[in-house]
């Protein structure tokens, strides 16, 4: 796992935790709901978080698709051309 993937996962988790907390406050203070609504809300947040995380992991970064040896060769050739 790369640093940007870890940062994305931690950020997503914090964001979804805040959204869940706000939803719980709204359901507890202003909207009268049945007790099982809290369970469904929690399950919905977990499913959405997992879905976004899986979607993000499926996206292929262009740098991962590039051959390291080929990239090194290209950098070397570009240095020579600049001189």
Image (cartoon, helix red, strand yellow):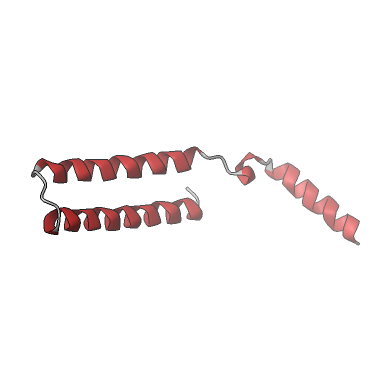
Q: Residue furthest left?
A: 35
Q: In front here: 24 or 2?
A: 24
Residue located 68% across and 44% down the image: 68
Image coords of residue 21 (percent x, y): 22, 57
- Residue 11, by quadrant, is bottom left
Q: In front here: 50 or 65?
A: 50
Instruction: Using the image, determine if residue 51 lies above or below residue 9.
Output: above
Residue located 40% across and 51% down the image: 9
* Image position of 58 (left or right of 13): right
The C terminus - image quarter:
bottom right
Image coords of residue 6 (percent x, y): 43, 53
Residue located 25% across and 53% down the image: 20
- Residue 34, by quadrant, is top left
Image coords of residue 17 (percent x, y): 28, 55
* Image position of 82 (left or right of 73): right
Q: In front here: 67 or 39?
A: 39
Residue located 27% across and 45% down the image: 45
* Image position of 70 (left or right of 52): right
* Image position of 81 (left or right of 34): right
- Residue 81, by quadrant, is bottom right
Q: Residue furthest bottom?
A: 83
């Amino acid at each position: 796992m790369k640093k940007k993937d870890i940062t994305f996962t931690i950020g997503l988790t914090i964001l979804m935790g805040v959204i869940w907390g706000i939803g719980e406050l709204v359901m507890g203070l202003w909207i009268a709901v049945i007790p099982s609504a809290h369970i469904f809300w929690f399950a919905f947040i977990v499913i959405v978080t997992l879905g976004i995380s899986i979607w993000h992991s499926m996206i292929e970064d262009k740098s991962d698709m590039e051959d390291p040896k080929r990239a090194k060769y290209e950098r070397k050739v570009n240095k020579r051309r600049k001189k």
